[in-house]
């Protein structure tokens, strides 16, 4: 239940929105008049979507050994609903701290929304995108290739993400009130670097001139207000959330997750576990396919050699740039809300010569993974040792001799790619994908289900802007939206067969195909025409295959009890030091504690213990460790990096966990508490 102040404000907003007449004082009358004249209803919502904190494969680097062992920061879904009060159209937009946003999640969210809202929210007007953090639990797809390193589909992670996104959108719907939106543009030049410069340089000079530094520095910000109050922001900017390396095993939203935390928690005072409305700051992607945050072009390097500090710095830079643009966002969003979405079989697109470099007709082909994709991105996360990016591959002759999986006709279609896995033919990667275009006043979001390089994004944006007759800067390429199909490189970049080109599934003409298909959406939106929905994506036969073992049992160990402190806090600490406490615990998969916490740093105030920090905060880390696999014993190590500015006083650390009885299967909760200590 909301606070009395919030409940009263919501009641006033609902009455104004409904055209009610209120008998108010002069000041309130002015506020009501302003609300009545607001062009939109806007609402915001946020929810926890953190999956299994232990023994769950992480999505992003495709490293089987990268299994979760705890939490640094929780993952969240951030949603906004916008309703055009004149025309009645609406969009529900959501950004999730996830590695990918697969079609399986998109469709499951739509089904759950339909249970509550009927046809109010559909695949036409719901836009879901991933921030692309590489430090979150995976296994949420029905496409085998994207579940392989996690040992298959992980139901608990899938459910946490789907339920959390639905909760965030539902909260945004409930929060709807008269409001305004303003638009701001700016640049950020020290939070990304081109990790595939040699491929980028193959593009025509006319394309490269748009990016003199080889990066896309553009940041676009929407500022949301309800009445006279600021309630949220969306800040689009392209950089990979790969500040955390492929050796990290703690759950993290990476640099974009930190940027949101810095704005919401540090600047706006949001306390996530209080479940009260607060400022929502989303940091979605645009065309980040070749944009790395590792400024020294090696994993975990740049600006510093510490991955946690790099995450904080790159996140802080995004927050600072967004806040500056936000404060100066003086262009009012005006006009209608509209949207178009259709499914396209990207393996069978006949591409008109208007969109190809040689002005001739070409076509795409079924998705194929290239050898350089298995090599990984050397700047962000190397893959199989001994493999290297680029064409020709020194291993290509060997691959040609031992690999019969890719038919010769398909290998020829995909040339010069050294084709190794025909994902589309095997049903391991998707061929049918959702393409979407949203109109929010004068801003247009091109929702694409892939990772687009900056030049690929530029060309798609140009095609859409031309069709609509609008300025290019008001058309954004929003990647990782409503589905996932790896990369999209330009035909020229494809020739280089770096990681991005080898991961461009549908061949050399993938970018021109997207240009053409998004232009069709733009034409339909411009003329008010409807489009056929296209072929429905099939559910792969092995879509929910899972080989990851579950929790068998938990035991505390002889003479021990769950929650018992094994290593206690010291008597006192100074700021800059770290407090560490080790507890006997159970497996975190027994209860994901979504919307809750595995830890609290509590402060003694007026004779009562109050929560000061939890496992969603930057200063804390929760680490789980299996100490005896046979008996099911494990420990939880909780650390608190005591930051400057921490109030002097008396504190303690509390761990909450759950244990599974090996005989009955019953799960029971427990807590453990350190002794109290001082911070000076």
Image (cartoon, rainbow, N blue to C red):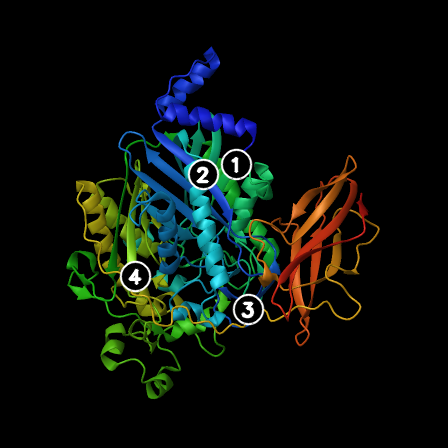
Q: Which residue is painted at 84% across and 51% down in the image?
A: 571
Q: Is residue 182 visible?
A: no
Distance (Cα) linking label 4 and label 1: 43 Å
Q: Are marks 4 and 2 in contact (CB under 8 Å)?
A: no
Q: Which residue is painted at 75% across and 57% down in the image?
A: 581
Question: Secondary structure under badge 3?
Answer: loop
Image quadrant where one finds the N terminus: top right
Question: Secondary structure under badge 2?
Answer: strand
Q: Are marks 1 and 3 in contact (CB under 8 Å)?
A: no
Image quadrant where one finds the C terminus: top right
Q: Is residue 642 visible?
A: yes
Q: Are marks 2 and 1 in contact (CB under 8 Å)?
A: yes
Tag in front: 3 or 4: 3
Residue at the spot of label 4: 490
Foreground of the two, 463 or 549 = 549
Q: Earlier in the sequence, mark 4 or mark 1?
A: 1
Foreground of the two, 505 or 104 = 104
Residue at the spot of label 1: 277
Question: Secondary structure under badge 1?
Answer: loop
Q: Earlier in the sequence, mark 2 or mark 1?
A: 2
How far from the left and from the top, in percent, is residue 618? 62, 50
């Amino acid at each position: 239940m909301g606070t009395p102040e919030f409940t009263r404000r919501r009641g006033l907003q609902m009455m104004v929105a409904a055209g009610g007449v209120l008998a108010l004082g002069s000041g309130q009358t002015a506020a009501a008049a302003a609300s009545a004249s607001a062009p939109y209803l806007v609402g915001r919502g946020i929810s926890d979507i953190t999956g299994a904190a232990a023994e769950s494969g992480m999505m992003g680097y495709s490293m089987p050994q990268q299994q979760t062992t705890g939490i640094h920061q929780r993952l969240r879904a951030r949603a906004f609903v916008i309703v055009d009060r004149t025309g009645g159209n609406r969009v529900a937009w959501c950004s999730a701290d996830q590695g990918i946003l697969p079609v399986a999640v998109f469709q499951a969210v739509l089904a759950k929304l339909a249970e509550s809202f009927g046809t109010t929210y559909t695949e036409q007007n719901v836009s879901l995108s991933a921030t692309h953090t590489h430090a979150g639990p995976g296994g949420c797809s029905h496409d085998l290739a994207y579940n392989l390193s996690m040992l298959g589909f992980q139901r608990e992670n899938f459910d946490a993400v789907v339920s959390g996104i639905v909760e965030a959108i539902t909260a945004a719907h409930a929060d709807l009130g008269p409001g305004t939106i303003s638009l701001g543009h700016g640049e950020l030049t020290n939070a990304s670097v081109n990790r595939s410069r040699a491929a980028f340089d193959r593009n025509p000079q006319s394309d490269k001139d748009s990016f003199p530094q080889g990066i896309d520095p553009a940041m676009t910000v929407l500022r949301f207000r309800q009445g006279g109050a600021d309630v949220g922001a969306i800040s689009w900017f392209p950089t990979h959330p790969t500040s955390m390396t492929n050796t990290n095993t703690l759950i993290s939203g990476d640099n974009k997750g930190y940027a949101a935390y810095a704005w919401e928690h540090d600047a706006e005072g949001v306390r996530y576990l209080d479940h009260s409305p607060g400022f929502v700051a989303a940091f979605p992607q645009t065309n980040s396919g070749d944009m790395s945050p590792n400024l020294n072009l090696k994993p975990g390097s740049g600006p510093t050699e510490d991955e946690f500090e790099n995450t904080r710095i790159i996140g802080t830079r995004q927050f600072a740039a967004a806040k500056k643009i936000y404060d100066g966002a003086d262009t009012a969003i005006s006009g209608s809300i509209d949207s178009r979405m259709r499914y396209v079989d990207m393996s069978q697109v006949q591409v008109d010569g208007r969109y190809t470099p040689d002005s001739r007709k070409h076509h795409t082909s079924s998705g194929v993974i290239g050898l350089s994709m298995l090599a990984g991105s050397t700047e962000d996360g190397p893959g199989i040792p001994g493999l290297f990016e680029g064409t020709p591959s020194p291993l290509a002759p060997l691959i040609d001799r031992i690999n019969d999986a890719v038919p010769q006709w398909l290998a020829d279609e995909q040339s010069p790619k050294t084709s190794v896995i025909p994902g589309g033919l095997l049903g391991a990667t998707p061929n049918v994908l959702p393409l979407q275009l949203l109109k929010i006043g004068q801003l247009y979001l091109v929702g694409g289900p892939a990772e687009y390089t900056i030049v690929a994004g530029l060309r798609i944006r140009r095609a859409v802007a031309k069709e609509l007759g609008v300025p290019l800067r008001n058309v954004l390429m929003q990647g990782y939206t409503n589905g996932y199909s790896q990369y999209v490189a330009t035909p020229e970049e494809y020739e280089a067969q770096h990681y991005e080109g080898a991961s461009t599934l549908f061949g050399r003409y993938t970018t021109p195909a997207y240009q053409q298909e998004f232009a069709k959406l733009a034409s339909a939106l411009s003329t008010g025409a409807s489009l056929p929905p296209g072929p429905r994506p099939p559910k792969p036969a092995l879509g929910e295959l899972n080989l990851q073992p579950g929790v068998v049992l938990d035991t505390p160990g002889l003479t021990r009890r769950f929650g018992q402190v094994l290593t206690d806090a010291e008597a006192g600490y100074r700021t800059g030091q770290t407090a560490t406490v080790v507890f006997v615990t159970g497996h975190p998969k027994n209860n994901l504690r979504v919307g809750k916490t595995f830890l609290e740093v509590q402060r003694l105030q007026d004779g009562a213990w109050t929560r000061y920090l939890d496992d969603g905060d930057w200063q804390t880390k929760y680490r789980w460790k299996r100490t005896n696999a046979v008996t099911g014993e494990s420990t939880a190590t909780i650390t608190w990096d005591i930051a400057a500015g921490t109030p002097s006083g008396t504190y303690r650390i509390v761990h909450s966990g759950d244990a599974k009885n090996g005989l009955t299967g019953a799960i029971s909760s427990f807590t453990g508490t350190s002794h109290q200590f001082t911070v000076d």
